[in-house]
Amino acid sequence: MKNLSKYALKIAIVAVLSVCSLTGCKKDETRLEPVTKTTKVSEIELSKLLQFVSITTTAPKDQIVYNEQNEEFVVYGWYHKSLADVRSEYSSANEYKATYEK
């Protein structure tokens, strides 16, 4: 009888531990609201960046379109360059600025 109660106790412990490990803990669900960024480009900045893209890609300005919704420049209808990339390249283009902006 003593062995039977020890055996039953072990089974009970294993059962409780199994149930606890399978259910696990629930994490607090935090809702992340989508960030709406408003990176409007002024006409002056757009003009400078358009000139920069035109010179660096050797594409005429009439072949470059700025897509405001996707925030990207599209050159020749197939080459896409994001606004962030163009701004980053423009900010570090010292030779371009020295040559073309006086």
Image (cartoon, grey):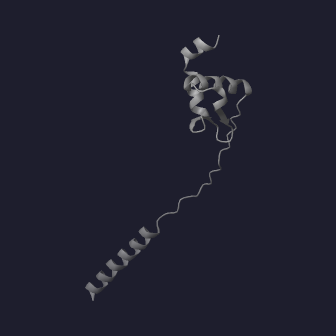
Image location (x, y in percent) of residue 58: 56, 24
Instruction: Where is residue 70? Give x, y as percent.
Output: 64, 41
Decide: is 95 above or below 45. above
Instruction: Tell me what residue is drawn at x 61 percent, y 33 percent.
Output: 83
Q: Name the image quarter holding residue 5.
A: bottom left
Q: In which quarter of the image is the C terminus?
A: top right
Residue occupying image coordinates x 64% and y 31%: 63
Above or below 21: residue 15: below
Between 37 and 17, the residue placed more toward the observer is: 37
Horizontal relation, residue 3 to residue 78: left or right: left
Q: Is residue 2 left or right of residue 18?
A: left
Q: Which residue occupies the foreground of this view, 8 or 34?
A: 34
- Residue 71 lies, in percent from the top left, at 64, 37
**Residue 22, quarter of picture:** bottom left
Looking at this rendering, what residue extends furthest in the right direction? 43
Q: Which residue is drawn at 54% across and 21% down?
A: 92
Q: Quadrant of residue 11?
A: bottom left
Extreme left residue here? 3
Q: Residue furthest bottom?
A: 1
Figure disc tally: 0
Query: Looking at the image, which is closer to me, 16 or 102?
Result: 102
Front position in the image: 34 or 90: 90
In the rendered image, the quadrant that contains the N terminus is: bottom left
Residue at 41%, 74% in the rendered image: 16
